[in-house]
Image (tube, rainbow, N blue to C red):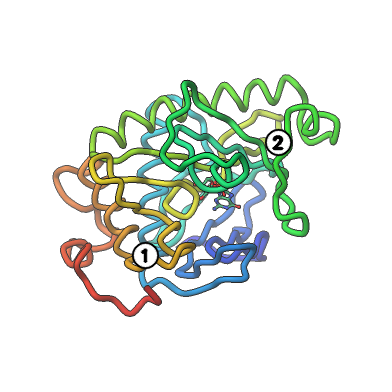
C-alpha cells in the first residue's frame, strides 16, 4: 500500500495526498458529487471506483497515443499514484458539440455541431467561479507563457483526436471535456487531473441519452447508472477479455441501466 501523508488538495470528488516522496502524489476518487459551485451536493454509490477506473483507462489510452500524463498506476479501487506537478491554474475546455454553459452564454441550441472544434480557457478560481478568459489574459496574468500555451493547445488537440474516434467506436459522442495541465520540476508540461463523466459530456451517438454529470445537475436521475455505462464501454474497449482485478465488478455492471439504486438519483 502506498503511504498516504499530508493532504495537498481537498476537493469534493477528488482528494490529493502526499506520499512521502517529493515526486509522487496519491489521487483519491470519492463518491461525492457537487454542482453549481458546490451548492448542490450528493453521494453516488460506487462513483469513486467507477471514476478511478474510467480515468485510468482513458489515461492509459492517451499514454499509448503518445500523450505524457501525470498518471503512473492505479494502486487501489479508488486511488492512483501520479507524478507530482506544479498546477497550472487553467481549465482547458474542448467542445466538439455545443452544450452547457456555451449554449446558455451564446443563446445556442444544445447539440449544434460547430464547423471546427472550440477551445475555451477558464481561470481556476473558486471565489470567481472559474471565469472564462482568453490567451491574452492567461499570458498577461503570468499564468503561462505564449510558448507554454502553444504546447497546451497542441496537446489538447491531440488528446481530442485520440478520444473522439475511440468513444465513437463504442457508440458514444464525446460532446465536451475539461482538462488541466501541470509542470514537472524541469518545466515540461504534462496532462494532469482526471477525465471521466464528472468532467466530460458523453451522449449516446444514436439516441442522445446523457451519460455524465448533467444527469445530476439537471435532476434527470440514474446518475450512477450513467457512470456505469461509460465504465462498461471503456472496459469493452480496453479489456475485451475481462474486467481487471480491483475494478468494479461485472455484477455492478450487469445491474446497469435498469438498477434502482439508493444513490440520490
Ligand atoms: P460547461 O462550460 O458547459 O460548464 O462545461 C464544459 C465541460 O467541461 C463539461 O463537460 C463540464 O463537465 C466540464 N467542466 C467545466 N468546468 C468544470 C469544473 O470546474 N470541474 C469539472 N470536473 N468539470 C468541468
Residue found 75% across the figure and 21% down from its top: 146
Label 1 vs label 2, nearer the camera: 1
Q: Residues within 10 Å of mark 1 (few under 14, many from 20)?
A: many
Residue found 29% across the figure and 41% down from its top: 172
Considering depth in this image, is 250 or 196 the residue closer to the camera?
196
SS assignment at label 2: loop
Considering depth in this image, is 125 or 217 the residue closer to the camera?
217
* In the image, residue 47 above or below residue 136: below
Q: Earlier in the sequence, mark 1 or mark 2?
A: 2
Considering depth in this image, is 33 or 49 the residue closer to the camera?
33
Residue 227 x, y percent position in the rendering: 34, 58
Residue found at the very far bottom of the displayed protein: 262
Q: Is residue 93 left or right of residue 143?
A: left
Residue 122 x, y percent position in the rendering: 68, 42
**The N terminus appears in which quarter of the rendering?**
bottom left
**The C terminus appears in which quarter of the rendering?**
bottom left
Q: Is mark 2 within 8 Å of ligand 1?
A: no
Residue 185, numbered circle = 2
How far apart are labels 1 and 2 at the CA level?
38 Å
Residue 223, numbered circle = 1
Amino acid at each position: 500500500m502506498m503511504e498516504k501523508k499530508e493532504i495537498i488538495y481537498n476537493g469534493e470528488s477528488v482528494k490529493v495526498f502526499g506520499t512521502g516522496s517529493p515526486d509522487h502524489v496519491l489521487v483519491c476518487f470519492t463518491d461525492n458529487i457537487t454542482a453549481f459551485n458546490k451548492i448542490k451536493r450528493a453521494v453516488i454509490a460506487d462513483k469513486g471506483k467507477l471514476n478511478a477506473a474510467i480515468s485510468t483507462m482513458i489515461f492509459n489510452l492517451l499514454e499509448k497515443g503518445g500523450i505524457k500524463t501525470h498518471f503512473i498506476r492505479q494502486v487501489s479501487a479508488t486511488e492512483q499514484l501520479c507524478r507530482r506537478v506544479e498546477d497550472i491554474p487553467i481549465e482547458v475546455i474542448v467542445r466538439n458539440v455545443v452544450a452547457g454553459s456555451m449554449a446558455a452564454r451564446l443563446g445556442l441550441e444544445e447539440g449544434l455541431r460547430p464547423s471546427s472544434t472550440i477551445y475555451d480557457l477558464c481561470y481556476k478560481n473558486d471565489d470567481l467561479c472559474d471565469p472564462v478568459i482568453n490567451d491574452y489574459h492567461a499570458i498577461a496574468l503570468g499564468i503561462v507563457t505564449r510558448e507554454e500555451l502553444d504546447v497546451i493547445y497542441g496537446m489538447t488537440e491531440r488528446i481530442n483526436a485520440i478520444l473522439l474516434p475511440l468513444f465513437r467506436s463504442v457508440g458514444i459522442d464525446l460532446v465536451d471535456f475539461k482538462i488541466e495541465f501541470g509542470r514537472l520540476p524541469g518545466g515540461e508540461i504534462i496532462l494532469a487531473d482526471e477525465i471521466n463523466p464528472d468532467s466530460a459530456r458523453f451522449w449516446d451517438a444514436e439516441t442522445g441519452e446523457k451519460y455524465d454529470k448533467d444527469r445530476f445537475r439537471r435532476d434527470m436521475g440514474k446518475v450512477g447508472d450513467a457512470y456505469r455505462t461509460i465504465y462498461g464501454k471503456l472496459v469493452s474497449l480496453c479489456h475485451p477479455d475481462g474486467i481487471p482485478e480491483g475494478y468494479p465488478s461485472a455484477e455492478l455492471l450487469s445491474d446497469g441501466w435498469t438498477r434502482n439504486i439508493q444513490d440520490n438519483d
